[in-house]
Amino acid sequence: MAVKTCLIVGLTLMYMTSAEINDTNAFVKSLTGNCREIGWEPTCERNARNSKTVAFHVYLTNSISSLSQNQTIKYDHVITNIGEGYDKTTGKFTAPVDGVYSFTWTYLTKHGAVAYVGGVIDGKQVVWAVIYGQTATWAGTTGHLVVKMKKGSQFWTPNTSKEVTYIHKLFTFLSGYKISDE
């Protein structure tokens, strides 16, 4: 591989310094021909251009003073929702296509508040994030999950404790995006 790379770089430099460079198309055509002559062609994903972009970012516009066990946080302000996977009426993200997804959520509580907010995939809690017994005026925490999902699978962030006593608006948000088609 190193020899092929050196050959390609060498041929490219020779070609670039020659007086034969008339235009970009001629350069690319010549470079492609040189690569093929030595048996090297760059690999690329055939479906890269057909890959569907999926990304969302949402946050709370009103603080939550009480959230019962297993109740889902419904982030009501949608900044981005490419692929239309996030539903603010349910607080759930539904994968519009198969892929590997990344989710991050952050929430802020006030002094003495308790908040356990987990990451759930299709009804099964897979990640935990907790604020309990803090003595600071404000405390925040973040949860993160990278997971392979099938089209139609859902992700959401419910309260996983007995009761959430306070979650602050604006500083509480959820983001997700598709990393790959795998």
Image (cartoon, helix red, strand yellow):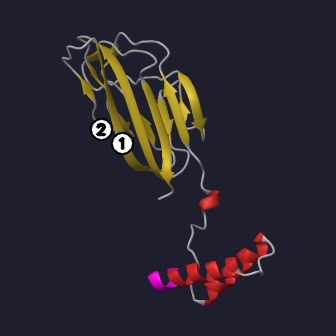
Q: Main secondary structure of the magenta part?
A: helix
Pick the residue in front: 20 or 134.
Answer: 20
Work out whether residue 127 or residue 152 is closer to the camera in this orientation and state it: 127
User: Would you place residue 110 above or below residue 42 in this image?
Assistant: above
Find out whether the residues at labels 1 and 2 contact each other: C-beta distance under 8 Å. yes
Which residue was labeled with disc 1? 145
Is 9 displayed left or right of 64 in the figure?
Answer: right
- Where does the image place residue 176, in percent across and percent down from the top left? 47, 39
Residue 157 visible, this angle: no
Q: Which residue is mark 2?
A: 127
Residue at 60% over, 41% down: 83
Name the secondary structure under disc 1: strand
Q: Residues within 10 Å of mark 2 (few under 14, many from 20)?
A: some
Q: Is 33 located above or below residue 27 in the figure?
A: below
Is-magenta flag for residue 104? no
Write the start and end of the magenta stretch as one range: 1-5
Note whether 47 is above or below 79 in the view shown: below
Q: CA distance from mark 1 to mark 2?
A: 7 Å
